[in-house]
């Protein structure tokens, strides 16, 4: 199958087992950034770190940023690195001055704790591809999963901002394996 998941921090999603099968960790943490260069006036994160991937390539080529509300970390599960038929890629990350805060609900203002938090850059979007075959030479079409650690980047007030709409449209096309439609400006 194909699936796109958008998860905000502080939300119980009940998909831990599914994510485990696809090699993705989506811990209930929040990503903060201490640099003013990576925060908009309203507190949103300005995202400039994209890994080369069909979903993000246009943003890289044209140096387009994205605007995310408070995201949660979504990263590759280290245990899934050598799993046959599974390819997990972190495609969007926060800045080097950011961190994923474990105590984001109780600690105000958020401060980095080396023992509990994840130092930046922190992955906030990850894709996973599952392929399978058989000993009989039959290729069975696999699936694709895209997980964003934020749902607000496609909200009405952010969708037309920077590269947000392109991220969403490219994610849909990639998940559907419509590669010829990728990176066409919306």
Image: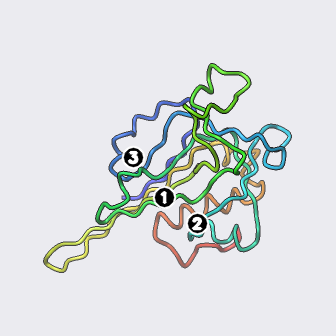
Nearer to us in this view, 145 or 82:
82
Q: CA distance from mark 3 to mark 2?
A: 20 Å
Residue at x 76% of width, y 68% of height:
63
Q: Which residue is mark 3?
A: 19
Residue 120: x and y in percent read 64, 47
| Distance between mark 1 and mark 3 Cα atoms | 11 Å
Q: Earlier in the sequence, mark 1 or mark 3?
A: 3
Q: According to the image, label 1 marks what residue?
A: 127
Instruction: Looking at the image, tell me whether mark 3 or mark 2 is earlier in sequence order.
Output: 3
Does residue 25 appear left or right of residue 182 in this picture?
left
* Residue at 60% in and 34% down: 114
Disc 3 crowd, CA 10 A, few/some/many (<14, 14-19, 20+): some
User: Which label was assigned to residue 55?
Assistant: 2
Q: Quadrant of the N terminus?
A: bottom left
Q: Are marks 2 and 1 in contact (CB under 8 Å)?
A: yes
| 156 up-or-down from 185: above or below | above
């Amino acid at each position: 199958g194909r699936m796109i998941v958008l998860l905000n921090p502080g939300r119980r999603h009940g998909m831990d087992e599914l994510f485990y099968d696809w090699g993705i960790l989506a811990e209930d943490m929040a990503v903060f950034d201490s640099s003013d260069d990576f925060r908009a006036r309203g507190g949103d994160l300005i995202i400039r770190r994209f890994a080369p991937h069909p979903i993000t390539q246009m943003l890289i080529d044209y140096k387009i940023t994205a605007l995310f509300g408070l995201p949660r970390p979504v990263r590759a599960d280290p245990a899934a690195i050598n799993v046959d038929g599974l390819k997990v890629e972190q495609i969007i990350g926060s800045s080097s001055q950011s961190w994923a805060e474990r105590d984001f609900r109780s600690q105000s203002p958020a401060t980095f704790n080396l023992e509990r938090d994840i130092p930046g850059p922190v992955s906030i979007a990850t894709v996973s591809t599952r392929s399978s075959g058989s000993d009989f030479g039959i290729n069975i079409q696999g699936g694709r999963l895209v997980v964003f650690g934020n749902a607000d980047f496609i909200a009405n007030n952010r969708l037309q901002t920077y590269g947000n709409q392109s991220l969403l449209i490219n994610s849909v096309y990639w998940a559907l394996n419509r590669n010829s439609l990728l990176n066409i400006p919306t």
